[in-house]
Amino acid sequence: MFLQNVLIASEQVAILYILVAVGAIADKAGIYTEKVAKSCTDLLFYIITPAVIIESFLSLEYNAETAKSLFVAMGCGFILHIVSAAISALVFNRCPADRRCIYKYSCAYGNCGYMALPLAGAVLGNEGVFYCSAVIISFQVFSFTHGIYTITKGKEGEKIKFDFKKLILNPGVISVIIGLPLFLLSVQLPEIIAKPMSYIASLNTPVAMLIFGTYIANTNFKSIFKDWRIFAVSLVKLIILPLLLISAFRFAGITGSLLVALSISAGAPTANNTVMFAAKYDRNTGLASQTVAVVSFISIITLPVMIALAQAVG
């Protein structure tokens, strides 16, 4: 089982990095450059991501049991992100001001959509996808509120006004506000609306990976080994946080497929949103790309271990 999990996780990472490689090659060939990719960030931010969120609600079949499971998993997801955000803030609070926001965000937010969701489906089937979809809801709420606040905090001497309205009225949270009632009321959208939304949502992974590839193509990887904090992010994100959260959830009585799904979400590598938000809010995209790349590669080893551990204790 352990070797099987290693192969599954490795395959998912390989699939993503083939798309990243295409983006990097396209950038070097001048077909799809970093400058063009930055202009596509708004497309991903305002249109594609909301379509993914709303579609995830529409894909869930409502009944009393699924509703209860959804809210239990969603609650666990909120706990996961609260703990992750708190620990990342403590660990990286004394880093250089212009890099601090990248370290904090990359440590707090995992690749729930592009990595955890397909991996949960491969390991647990539809039940795993269901639980991870619930965690994605909490991810979207946190990443589009606390995450945006974290990534937009200024450098030393720069005053940042906390605009609560702006943090709530954003594509991620608005999409949850739209999608949740559709799930609770078992609304089935007509195909003329649902089909275009599905087509748009299907662009999520390839567009995000191609954009990421252009940033990778313009990243100086020699500088990775000069910044030990990237490896500190890997240690906290991939080992310390998953072990802490798996222990806490098991102590709270969470077992079985839900525990395994939560372990996948907790142990997922840094979210690609790190690069997307860095580009969107004019932060250090090179550092963001380096961090996502390093943490993702290391997760090939750590993710199967966390999955096997959750299966053993649950």
Image: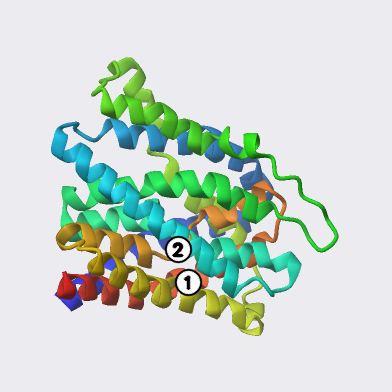
Residue 253 — which label? Answer: none
Residue in front for this viewpoint, 217 or 147: 147
> x and y percent of residue 170 in the render?
57, 35
Q: Quadrant of the C terminus?
A: bottom left
Q: CA distance from mark 1 to mark 2?
A: 19 Å
Q: Select label 1 or label 2 by which is in front.
A: 2
What kind of residue is marked 1?
Answer: Val
Q: Which residue is mark 2?
A: 83
Whether 57 is drawn above or below 186: the answer is below
Viewer-nearest residue: 49 or 60: 60
- Camera-nearest residue between 40 and 303: 303
Mark 1 secondary-structure assignment:
helix
Circle 1 sits on which residue?
A: 295
What x and y, as percent, mark residue 300?
A: 35, 73
For residue 247, which quarter of the picture? bottom left
Say left or right for 297 vs 302.
right
Mark 1 surroundings: few (<14), some (14-19) or many (≥20) residues within 10 A: many
Q: Is residue 290 visible?
A: no
Quadrant hosting residue 261: bottom left
- For the N terminus, give its image quadrant: bottom left
